[in-house]
Image (cartoon, grey):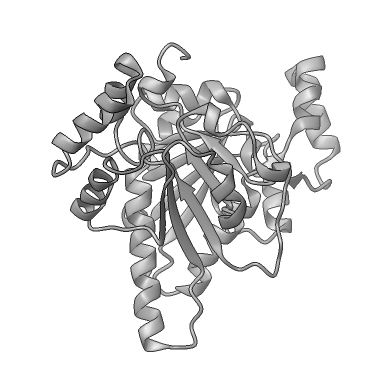
Amino acid sequence: MAFQIEHKLVIGVASSALFDLAGSHQVYLDSGPEEYRKHQEQNLDVILGKGVAFPFIRRFLNINKCFPRQSPVEVVLFSRNSPETGLRVMRSIAHYGLDISRAAFMTGKSPYTYLPAFNASLFLSANEEDVRNAIQAGYPAGIVLPSKISDEDDDIELRVAFDFDGVLADDESETVFKRNNDLNEFHAHETEHMAVPHQPGPLADMFQKLALMQRLEERMQKRDPNYRKILRIAIITARNAPAHERVVTTLKSWGVSANETFFLGGMNKTRVLSVFKPHIFFDDQLTHLKSSPGGTIPMVHVPFGVANRGQI
């Protein structure tokens, strides 16, 4: 039986993250909403190019192809367009064969307030204001940063990478470090609290539901030894020993784990990202997202917590 939306892993994606709307947006900036509407109507059958989040979304939807009976995931389009100007987006979705049937068209307004109505565990958008407002309202969201698109059809895996503090966990420990920028103080705090799980961060629900997808894959592989798993999850954190233990404690308390976990001790994260090659990487600090190897790793900024205070 197919999962009801209340039990699915739902991702809300803005058209600005899914497709390359640079040309259309420039028309809006240069000539206003009426010319933008005309431009979209005149180019209704001109398929939009792939956006930064496209490879991730396409592979994410493939989870349903592996589990058609349950259909455990869903993507909902959230758009500032009107239904009329959004027709080009919907036709582009159909052209690429993306199984996206639900949509919210807001005719110029921000769509983030409707995230709970669709049970969304993530909202992806290139609109910084929308994402920051969503985070302030307590909703899980990330700003898709510009990068080149790499979408290899023969690569069936879905690789997702997360930072830990301020993304999967709350910013308690980051707050301790930022107080005096003292690494020793941070390590002392984490050693003292190593048996105390962190409170969930903005993307904890998404991570836990991805872990459920992994358990579905494990059961499938037991039934069919030839089944090839498609989902790989990595945690890539600047922590190192002794602060690593609290990460393990937290994940264990949630009943989840990652396929690969890296405690880098401040080492440049791109050294690991260039090997893991995620289809999306979430981090709360822009300094960790500035340089992508070759510019082809989709980076998402989660503007949550003390690391982002004063920027909102």
Q: Is residue 84 visible?
A: yes
Picture quarter containing residue 19? top right
Query: What residue lies at 51% left-to-right and 51% top-to-bottom?
Result: 75
Q: Is residue 4 visible?
A: no
Quarter occupied by the N terminus: bottom left
Residue 289, position as x, y percentages in the image: 57, 34
Is 70 above or below relative to 31? below
Is residue 184 rendered to the left or right of residue 308?
A: left
Is 107 above or below relative to 300? above
Residue 28, position as x, y percentages in the image: 76, 21
Along the line of sight, the residue nearer the viewer: 240 or 22: 240
Query: What residue lies at 67% left-to-right and 44% top-to-bottom?
Result: 293
Residue 263, position as x, y percentages in the image: 39, 46
Picture quarter containing residue 148? top right
Residue 261, position as x, y percentages in the image: 40, 54
Is residue 253 rendered to the left or right of residue 116?
A: left
Query: What residue lies at 39% left-to-right and 70% top-to-bottom?
Result: 70
Query: What residue lies at 56% left-to-right and 56% top-to-bottom?
Result: 276
User: Which residue ends up furthest to the front in the rendered image?
Assistant: 184
